[in-house]
Amino acid sequence: MLSRFMSGSIRNLDREYNCTVRLLDDTEYTCTIQRDAKGQYLFDLICHHLNLLEKDYFGIRYVDPDKQRHWLEFTKSISKQMKSQPPFTMCLRVKFYPPDPAALKEEITRYLVFLQIKRDLYHGRLLCKTSDAAMLAAYILQAEIGDYDPGKHPEGYSSKFQFFPKHSEKLERRIADIHKTELMGQTPETAELNFLRKAQILETYGVDPHPCKDVSGNPAFLAFTPFGFVVLQGNKRVHFLKWCVHEHEVTKLKFEGKTFHIYANQKEEKKIILTYFAPTPEACKHLWKCGVENQAFYKLEKSSQVRTVSSSNLFFKGSRFRYSGRVAKEVMEQSAKIKRDPPEIHRAGLVPSRSCPSITHGPRLSSVPRTRRRAVHISIMEGLESLRDSAHSTPVRSVSHGDSFMTRSRSQAMEASGGSGEAVISDEAYCPSDSVLPTPVAEHSMELAVSRQVNGAPCSIEEEKESEAGTPSMGETGDLGPDGRALVSGLGAGVGLSSLSEAEQVNKFVLSVLRLLLVTIGLLFVLLLLLIILTESDLDIAFLRDIRQTPEFEQFHYEYFCPLRRWFACKLRWVGGLLINDK
């Protein structure tokens, strides 16, 4: 107890904290912040470091000791939001996906969004059919290694890179064919722009999935996109509710405990309520806050229209939250006013001194110096060098169950589903690896490592950073095989996702009854006090006169009220006498 008190006191005396933010290109930005610094201060530091002006699309994400992800709130103190002890570790991520990323004003912004979508593609959050997958991967190759060169790129060079959670040799050959024949001459800027245009039309563009379960206990993924609220279940999009139309429009988001409700309008003024269950109350609250922010960002015309949202029910206040940033329309208007020379961009594989992300997954660096920015990756050019040295060796790749990532473009899906019905997005079930795996944040230990391996999570702090940054180790995808990977995905989807059992339903009902009983007793007590005050007052009202004339009131008045009044008067005189004597 004494040691805990002393450690807490020492920690509170620290005026400065070290903070490390993992950037989208896998480099780390380390700085020192004051104890009372707010999230906006840290975010402005990072944007200044990146020379980024269109910053409203981005946010800072962190993971608490319970492995729950959060977005850093810019209006609150950083130290009060972080439940762990310093030094703090966070990640810069795209928080609000641009509705049209290719239309962004500055190239630096498009490049950062490109890096984010590339991560989404690798983790399975951006699901696409085989032809689109090959084209997207070819654009990545063209942007990061340039034109195909037989002297530098031996046969099978595309198999050295991991673009997706799993893929086949046929898809690898298709990627190489497109890179060799169709993309020659494209600059990195052009390849990234074409990548963004291709990704934007996919059904799962902008999806940051939250694992939940429906009322029947079936797994589902809920997500908020630039166009509306999406529910993905199995290989289908079962619901799509838009932000800004009168039909199929999201009107209200609400949560209580682990239960999340979505209220929406349907045709002919009909209303629907969708109910889902999150793994934990903290996960449900995070889901609700993400929904409130996305709805405000994409739906409202001005930030002045933003209102504080409450999750209150009939008797209790509940959580209150307010989106504090600008809305999408204001961001685009502000971007149009930017007038400056385009900032220099250093890309992976083009500038060797630049510490950029790699789409290879080789051995990690065991130790790196603690500098302002440091690389924690093996560059793409080193991967190509090692490939030339072992051109005849067997390439390392994930084993695929098939060759299909079937989906349809958004326009085709909208025509088929009418905007809100079911739409098939894939031949395989939607199961993004990074979104369902727990993210470890505790210190190294053998027992924790074993438990993480069982649950399909990374096994070290470095791998935790890697997973949170969106770059998992090869052990997650390359060493399991088809059955092992399916088992890990199933475990990841099942861990922490417990449906409401009968016991939980009974407990919830009992708590509701007790809550209602307590509120009723409280109201009756307040009414009784009010009635006593009115009857003992000099108000001359007919029903009060009738009450005063009853034997019960006279008994209460002379046996209880009058002695209590005399006791209070005596105590007040005694306290008054003490005060006079002191003076």
Image (cartoon, rainbow, N blue to C red):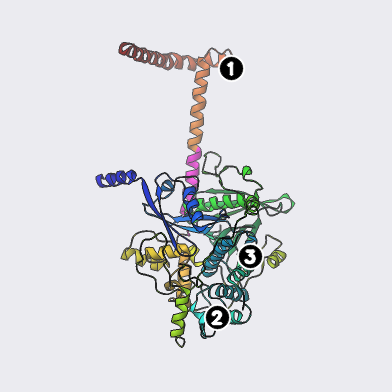
Which quarter of the rendering shows the C terminus?
top left
**Number of other residues with Cα within 10 Å of mark 1, as a class: few under 14, some 14 to 19, many 20 or more:** few
* Three-letter amino acid code of the residue under disc 2: Glu
Q: Which residue is mark 1?
A: 543
Mark positioned earlier in the residue sequence (1 or 3):
3
Above or below, 130 against 108 in this view is below
Which quarter of the rendering shows the N terminus?
top left
Identify the secondary structure beneath mark 3. helix
Q: Quadrant of residue 94?
A: bottom right
The residue most toward the right is 268
Q: Which residue is mark 3?
A: 200
Q: Does the magenta segment cover residue 439?
A: no
Identify the secondary structure beneath mark 1. helix
3D distance between C-alphas at marks 1 and 3: 72 Å
Locate residue 68, reporting x and y percent.
45, 56
Above or below, 337 against 433 in this view is above
Q: Nearer the viewer, mark 1 or mark 2?
A: 2
Q: Nearer the viewer, mark 1 or mark 3?
A: 3
Above or below, 580 against 152 in this view is above
Dominant secondary structure, magenta:
helix
Q: Which residue is mark 2?
A: 172
The residue drawn where x is 50% and y is 20% is 532
The magenta span reads: 497-516
3D distance between C-alphas at marks 1 and 2: 89 Å
